[in-house]
Image: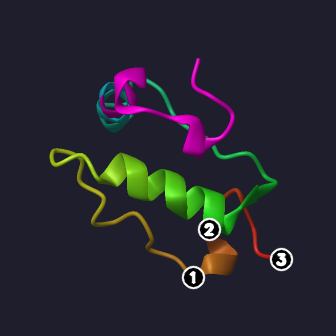
């Protein structure tokens, strides 16, 4: 199980492997409704830093429409 906060992750925690499993449809990640945009963006930046992870389409909607983000 991953840490509650993305800032607690380390490469050795298997983030890249989990991202690949999500990309292939083995499971779906869902952000908690109360996640702050800064935390979500930081987490995505960490995961998207891996060279083989394609994050080119990660934000297709405006911030208010992003699932799981509290815009306030």
At a point 37% along the width and 30% down the height, the residue shown is 25
What is the residue that sits farthest to the top in this orientation? 1
Start and end of the magenta stretch? 1-16
Q: Nearer the viewer, residue 60 or 43?
A: 43
Mark 2–mark 1 Cα distance, whole angstroms, equals 7 Å
Question: Callout 1: few (<14), some (14-19), or many (20+) C-alpha neighbours within 10 Å?
Answer: few
Is 32 placed left or right of 63 in the picture? Answer: right
Mark 1, secondary structure of its residue? loop
N-terminal label among 2 and 3: 2
Instruction: Find residue 54 and report its image quarter.
Output: bottom left
Q: Nearer the viewer, mark 2 or mark 3?
A: 3
Residues under numbered marks 2 and 1 in contact, where contact means CB atoms less than 8 Å apart:
yes
- Name the disc covering residue 27, or none: none
At a point 29% along the width and 53% down the height, the residue shown is 49
Q: Which residue is mark 3?
A: 72
Mark 2, secondary structure of its residue? loop
| Residue 11 pos. (x, y %) | 35, 31
Instruction: Find residue 24 and report its image quarter.
Output: top left
Q: Nearer the viewer, residue 55 or 11?
A: 11
Q: Which residue is mark 2?
A: 66
Mark 3, secondary structure of its residue? loop
Residue 12 on the magenta segment: yes
């Amino acid at each position: 199980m991953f840490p509650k906060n993305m800032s607690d992750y380390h490469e050795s925690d298997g983030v890249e492997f989990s991202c690949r499993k999500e990309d292939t449809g083995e499971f779906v990640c869902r952000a908690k409704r109360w996640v702050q945009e800064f935390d979500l963006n930081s987490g995505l930046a960490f995961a998207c830093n891996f060279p083989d992870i394609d994050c080119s389409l990660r934000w297709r909607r405006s911030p208010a429409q992003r699932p799981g983000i509290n815009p306030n």
